[in-house]
Image (cartoon, rainbow, N blue to C red):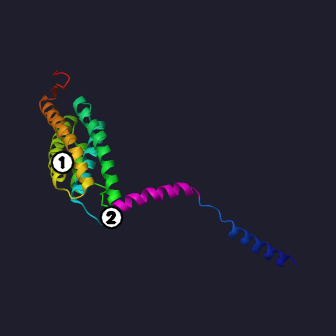
Amino acid sequence: MKIPSLLSLVLLTAVISSCNPKPAPDSQNDLNQIAKDSIDNDLASATLKNEFVEQAAIGGMMEVESSARMIKHTENPDIQTLATIMVKDHGAANAELKSIAKKEEIFFPQSLPAEKLAKINTLDSLQEETCNRFYADLMVEEHKAAIALFSAASESESNPEIRAFAKKHLPILKAHYAHAMNTQKIIHSIKNDKGDQTIKTSKDRQ
């Protein structure tokens, strides 16, 4: 008689368990992560391409990432100031462009191309003075290219929202370019003589 009773107990337990499944641990966190990932995946897998959006996104990411590294690498106040502005302004512009891309279902790159990453990684291998010059040159180069890109889009881009974005940010890019040019001039004027440094910052020149 004990065997049938034991069998009945096992069957009853199985039925109760099937009617009351336990929720997966951290289910809400998993859902949040899935929702976040789906946004990025949607942007990365969107089939509609826009040359301006793609190039502007890459340029913006390049400037944010390189500037974030420079904030850690340098103690030069002129470079620190320039890099901080780049992170703030381009970070905000990237978020705005990403929102437009999502709305318009346009492909938005999620990472930098290899050649851009190589330039950023160069910052990690240089001594501070050389690194400062490399970064200043890079910001001048990147903003010169960005101004050409945004100027063209502000006139000929067919998507009105993207065209408005280009027009809005073109004056900001021109201001960044002027700032980068001034910083480049200051950084390249720093003299090195067998390790002895005569450093003049923008504050010293006032």
Q: Residue at x 24, y 47 (%)?
A: 120
Q: Can residue 113 be seen in this view?
A: no
Provide the secondary structure element on which disc 2 rests: loop
- What x and y, as percent, mark residue 160? 25, 55
> Are there few (<14), some (14-19), or many (20+) residues within 10 Å of tag 1?
many
**Closest to the observer, 63 or 57:** 57
Compared with 151, 77 (above or below) is above
> x, y (%) of residue 39?
40, 58
Q: Give the range drawn in magenta.
A: 25-46
Give the residue pinned by disc 1: 146
Instruction: Where is residue 63? Give x, y as percent.
Output: 25, 45
Q: Which amino acid does label 1 sit on?
A: Ala
Q: Is mark 1 on a helix, strand or loop?
A: helix
Distance between the alpha carbons at the discs numbered 2 and 1: 24 Å
Residue drawn at (77%, 72%) of the image: 12
Using the rendered view, name the quadrant where residue 106 is placed.
bottom left
**Residue on which disc 2 sits:** 46
Which is nearer the eye, 159 or 88? 159
In which quadrant of the rendered view does residue 136 lie?
Answer: top left
Residue drawn at x 69%, y 69% as measured from the top left? 19
Judge whether 177 appears above or below 26 on screen.
above
Mark 2 neighbour density, 10 Å: few (under 14) some (14–19) many (20 or more): some
Look at the image and tell me in which quarter the N terminus lies: bottom right
Residue 82 on the magenta segment: no
Judge whether residue 35 is colored magenta: yes
Marker disc for residue 25: none
Most common SS among magenta residues: helix
Side of 177 where 15 appears, left or right: right
